[in-house]
Amino acid sequence: MSNKVIVNGRETDLKMTICTRCVQDSTVPGISFDRKGVCNFCDLHDKMTQLFPNDERGEAYLKEFFTKLKQQNKHKKYDCVVGISGGRDSTYLIYKIVKDWKLRPLAVHFNDGFDNPVAGENMLKAVKKLGVELRTITSDWREAKDLKISFLKASTPDLNLGTDIGIASSLYGVAHKEKINCILIGQSFRTEGVKPLSWSYFDGDYLRNVQRKFGTVKLRPWKPDQPNFNLGIKEMFYYSVIKGIKTLTPFYYHNYVRAEAETIIKNELDWVYPGAHYFDDLYHSLIKYVHRLKFNIDLNMNSDSALVRSRQLDRQVALERAHSIYKIEQDDIIELCIKRLGISRADFDRYLAHPPKTFRDYKTSYNYIRMAKLPIYIMSRLDLIPKVAYDKYFNCGE
């Protein structure tokens, strides 16, 4: 007799172990539990909290960093590049940058063809009210579409890798072109958590190899000033080490409380809730659907666990909504995404039926990344690459 049941459309093991502190469970790749039933992701959270304090020590670090940044760029037009999508995190970040930290940012938005109109309006209102220049990088639609179809065919969970690399490439490309030496990113392990590596593996060489295997469009070659879908180890080394472009995640050091931030941007910037987390991009509706049905992945459980650890969400509330079907899994949006990709529903269902795989089933740079463990650690602590990079590759299970 099987020990598995279906709860809200997601396969659940009756003998499943749930962390006694957060709500991560034994369906998460690479998870382990100590004698008290606390998971290793909670342990990682505590270690990162020690490394990146968000009390007066964190604020002092940000003050010193931004003071130096202003001094370095006092004769330039911009102090930093900041990514913006119109979602909660990026909107609050740009608000803090201008209003509290008194920096002069250049806002950069990457459009992969699936922008949420509500998030788009949020973005435009924010930059107008704050007096910030916005630069939108629109992807080559043939390439963007081909990459999304390629990863559906590859049958791996990292369905949005093309967009993730497109965003990073846009930030670096604009910074390089405008001679800006700092990129600010609106991420926080305290509100988002850190996903298992097999759920969201970031590797430009992996992307190119999957696209060569399943795609039909030739990707444009990399040029430092022209953002595209090429951002592998060599390109990252060029931007971060050769050109010295730093990448800082201010919310690692700032006491970022999501509910308070939402109230502020609603009042100050007329921000409107675009939907569940990550719903600043319509394609996430399809991704959540595929994750649930094919990979038994619950990303909301990951972010809710982070909020529980940070005492921004009651654990009982998180338990009650664990494994629930996402509100953003809207049939009309999923059908719109399928149509926009230019494939039939039958094609999509066939890709959905393929056996699940991970990045380990394809050619990647993972072995080289593992050999560069010490340099990656040093670069992450020097803000040459996002601080989460080291923990992502080496401390997040399978």
Image (tube, rainbow, N blue to C red):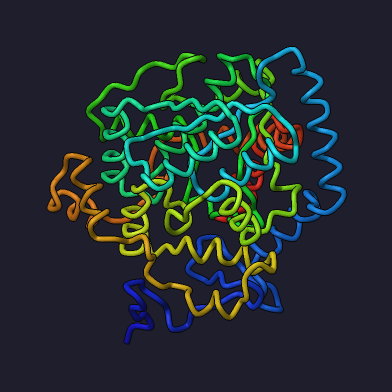
Residue at figure coordinates x 69%, y 58% from the top left? 44
Relative height, residue 14 to residue 326 (above, below): below
Q: Is residue 201 left or right of residue 181?
A: left
Q: Is residue 38 left or right of residue 150?
A: right
- Along the viewing direction, whichever of 362 and 117 lies nearer the viewer: 117
- Along the viewing direction, whichever of 149 and 67 lies nearer the viewer: 67
Outermost residue to the bottom: 1
Residue at figure coordinates x 55%, y 74% from the top left? 318
Which quadrant of the view contains residue 190?
A: bottom right
Residue 210 in percent (x, y) is at: 34, 35
Residue 76 in percent (x, y) is at: 70, 14
Which quadrant of the view contains residue 182?
A: top right
Relative height, residue 204 to residue 190 (above, below): above
Q: Is residue 340 left or right of residue 50?
A: left
Which quadrant of the view contains residue 222?
A: top left
Count of marks placed on residues: 0
Residue at figure coordinates x 35%, y 81% from the top left? 5
- Along the viewing direction, whichever of 139 and 47 lies nearer the viewer: 139
- Along the viewing direction, whichever of 204 and 315 lies nearer the viewer: 315
Relative height, residue 17 to residue 388 (above, below): below
Q: Is residue 194 left or right of residue 203?
A: right
**Does residue 66 appear in the picture of this structure?**
yes
**Does residue 232 appear in the picture of this structure?**
no
The image quadrant where one finds the N terminus is bottom left
Residue 295 in percent (x, y) is at: 37, 60
Residue 255 in percent (x, y) is at: 74, 54
Residue at figure coordinates x 74%, y 53% from the top left? 48
